[in-house]
Image (cartoon, helix red, strand yellow):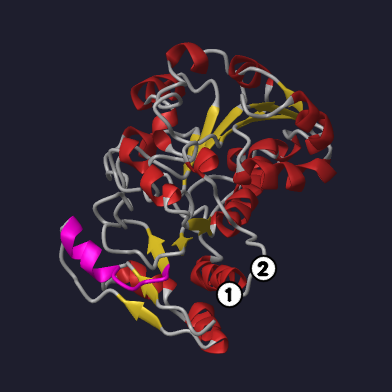
Amino acid sequence: MGVPNIFFMAPPGFTRDWFWRGASRRRAEELGYVVRLNECAGAMAKSDWAEQLVGVEALLTTWGSPRLDEEILSKSSALKVVGHVGGSVANIVSPALYERGVRVCTANALMARTVAEWALMMSMVALRRLLSYAQFGASSRALDWAGTRVNTPPAHATVGIWGYGDVARELIALLRPLGPTLLVCDEYLSPEQAVREGVERTALEDVLSRADVIHCLTGLTPHTKGRIGAAELALIKDGATLINCGRAPLIREEDLISGLRQERFWAIMDVYENEPLASDHPYRSMPNVVLTPHNAGCGRDEYYLAAMLDEFARFFSGQELQMEVGWDRASLMTDSSLLRGRS
């Protein structure tokens, strides 16, 4: 087969430039692919998108791309494969897309590994109680030599994970050699999988009440939005750390603020209800809170588009896709329409 007709939906601007660079541009050259870029800077109607997709065989989507519904696909009879330059495809795909036999893949695995590394780092920060005694730059905190002795070795710790998606599986693989007890709450984790992974399958309430470190990594869906509220937060044991690099609306913000004000447990957060986080947000003045600017997944971004081009190469040469997402899985991934701030 000849060179496929490839179109990248990202409009001119930061997102397009961020992904269409370095390793990804080089990979396109190596494969002999010409990637047509979207040059429409403003908002586009569905009919305009439909015209853009005429003749496109391989489509690159990313954050902000429209859902590929029946109207947008109305003139795209040539479309065979979609590669999402990002993580969740829940807001991109539709039943109409899959009904046409279009294959869908995503760079979620690359992002998941990066997020899991961040989560591992923050697990160690929590277990070593680093922020109780460390000095950062010109911080006025006095070095507390006695505080360095207040820590929990990973092998003596219990780590709880809400969710069993790509990030959770990567985090489990990173944590396993350190020897903690691993608790996982996910209705789609079978007892057989739990045994193979060496984790204990349990309820969310059990994760919250038993774990020294709690990770919120489940997908954001109508079922999980606001699942953790005041009653659930009250289960967290004194001195534990709640880490959220998944999605902020999994936890009711007003309840989390109230819980943290008691200074009974810690929180480390990378995601927020509204982003960027307001300069006067209560989190910013809490001594038991660590904040990072929604960058847990940063590090492999340059390779997302390249990975999707490799999937296209496999598809058009008749090889098996490595990062494919079917409708069943896509429907369980984070739905960013449930976010109040940016996705």
Q: Residue at x 56, y 45 (%)?
A: 142
Please indicate whether residue 104 sits to the left or right of residue 158 in the image. left
How far separated are the C-alphas under marks 1 and 2? 8 Å
Residue 291 is covered by the magenta coloring: no
Q: Which mark is residue 313?
A: 1
Q: Residue at x 32, y 67 (%)?
A: 10
Q: Is residue 1 above or below residue 314?
A: below
Quarter of the image where the N terminus is located? bottom right
Please indicate whether residue 63 sits to the left or right of residue 125 in the image. left
Please indicate whether residue 21 sits to the left or right of residue 197 in the image. left
In-front residue for pair 294/45: 45
Q: How many marks?
A: 2
Please indicate whether residue 153 sits to the left or right of residue 117 in the image. right
Which residues are the magenta region? 46-58
Q: Which residue is the site of mark 2? A: 319
Locate residue 46, reporting x and y percent.
19, 56
Q: Amino acid at mark 1?
A: Ala
Tag 2 secondary structure: loop
Tag 1 secondary structure: helix
Q: Residues at badges 1 and 2 in contact (C-beta under 8 Å)? A: yes
Sequence-wise, the earlier of marks 1 and 2 is 1
